[in-house]
Amino acid sequence: MPNEPRHESPEKNVKSILEWLALAHGRAGLEDATRLHRKLLLLRATPLPMEQRLQLLDLLYGYAARLATAQFPALHETTLPVSRKMRQLVRSIQDSLEVLAQDYVDTLTAAPESATRRPAASLRPAMQCLAWHVTISHLAAAPTAPGIWQQLHGVFRTARRLGAEDEPGPAGESTIHRIYLSSLLLSVVQPASFTSRELEFIGNYIDHCAPTIQLAEEIPAEHEGIFWIDPDRDAPAHALARRTPPPETPVLYFACDVIAQGAADHLAALESGRSAADLGLPAFAESHAGRGVLRRLASFWGRPAKRKFPRRRQSYRADLCAGLAPLWQLLNSPDEAPGAVSEWMITNESPDGYAMMHVSGTPGELRVGDIVALRPHRGDAAGERAWQICIVRWALSENPEHIELGLQVLAGQGIPAILALPRNHQAGTAALLLPKAPPLRPSQALVVPTGTVDDPSEKLIVVVEQDNVAVYELRPTCLDERTASVEVFTVEPDERP
């Protein structure tokens, strides 16, 4: 595609931009995203009066907003690795958002103090562009681009200096403070540990349920769930419980215990039978996955956990089988390894987990929260290596050829089983029985597809076929884990008649 003309007269360049906007209305493909970026660069290179430049920026911002939000439904359905075409589209949109944000900020320094346009009218779209940039990275399971967080901090600092951070937006748009706060709240819940659909729900929850949270230069007294940011660094917020700010560094603090308690209260109301509509929540909140998200949000915001074990750098390989169905088949027929087994490089490990990157083989449709089996290569014979049962805690993918995973070990081994519910006369469900493994797992656990066990008080009939057929009557005592893919229950023998 030829480059846009940059040495035409300003009138021709303006006409080119306006004609393209008229033709591009309603389109949201890769070519349109690329064209948007080029039109923004064309506007940047065209000498124009400030008022005319701002009018064109506003028009291009309106198209960029439609283009960015139009991709969210498609990103909700993605699995890793994200396709090359989707990755190119995402990057083109993010490039345009970054240019827009910078150009809006630049207009403040170029415009005279007597300009009729208020600072918030330029800083709000700049902040929104950067917030969308961060959100798209989360949805695409990609790391945030270098410099974006530093720009976010800078826009908020400028708005605060000019007294524009809480100025209401037109047509009910969020204030600069609110947009910035939403990005911070999303960043501290480890976005890489949620699926795209879960992240959409979290974003809606923050927008509609988060109270006003103030940023202060001192640690908030009598509060828990405290986080801090260094406005001069290109990084999101950090939990004070996990990391303290460097001495003599001016930072801003905020507390999340109120929104954490709100998430816990909403979860309790849903568990008691209240509907999401009654609580003013999206319908997704009623699903098993939605309730699992609320449980995790209450923990992330209210009780940020310290790391239990130190991590050690490693460099050895391991086999991975992803998904409950392929994993069940693998453990049930070890000599018939499914094609879903792929090879990975362990980059660091601790007693309860691994970080790893993809090396070869088809990784399958990886999702955060799914169950996987891992078999490390440590020099022992292939037949003697055990498959550890893990859950995918986080996932990142900078490009379609590069995937990184964080795994938490659930058990040193898993036993394929069939779950039968007395109330259900249909065929049994594939499940995994995790044996006791103190201190990692002091009790037995059962892994089932999410939504299989509606009533935790009911008796579970678990059939295990190994050397002999064994039938166990179990009852759940605790829900340890709930994701969009699986639920993990601590179980014990059910001695009820």
Image (cartoon, rainbow, N blue to C red):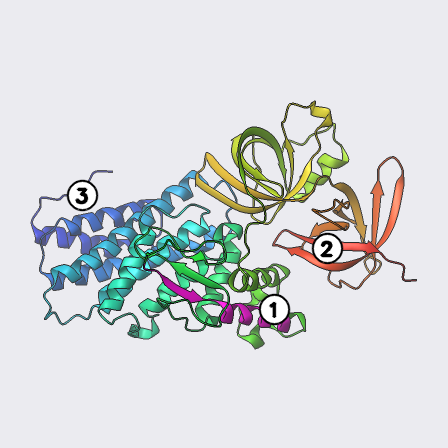
The percent position of residue 329, horizontal first and vertical second, equals 72, 37
The percent position of residue 415, horizontal first and vertical second, equals 77, 41
Question: Counting residues from the N terminus, which is met first, the one under dot 3 or under dot 2?
Answer: 3
The boundaries of the magenta stretch are: 250-269
Residue under label 1, please give it: 267
> Please, what secondary structure does the residue beneath circle 1 have?
helix
Question: Counting residues from the N terminus, which is met first, the one under dot 2 or under dot 1?
Answer: 1
Q: How far apart are the alpha carbons under marks 3 and 1? A: 53 Å
Q: Nearer the viewer, mark 3 or mark 2?
A: 2
Query: In the displayed image of the protein, which residue is found farthest to the right?
Result: 497
Q: Amino acid at mark 1?
A: Leu
Q: Amino acid at mark 2?
A: Phe
Q: Residue at x 41, y 55 (%)?
A: 135
Residue under label 3, please give it: 4
Taking depth in this image into account, of 34 and 347 the one nearest to the observer is 347
Query: In the displayed image of the protein, which residue is found farthest to the left?
Result: 9
- Residue 251, compared with residue 374, is above or below; it is below
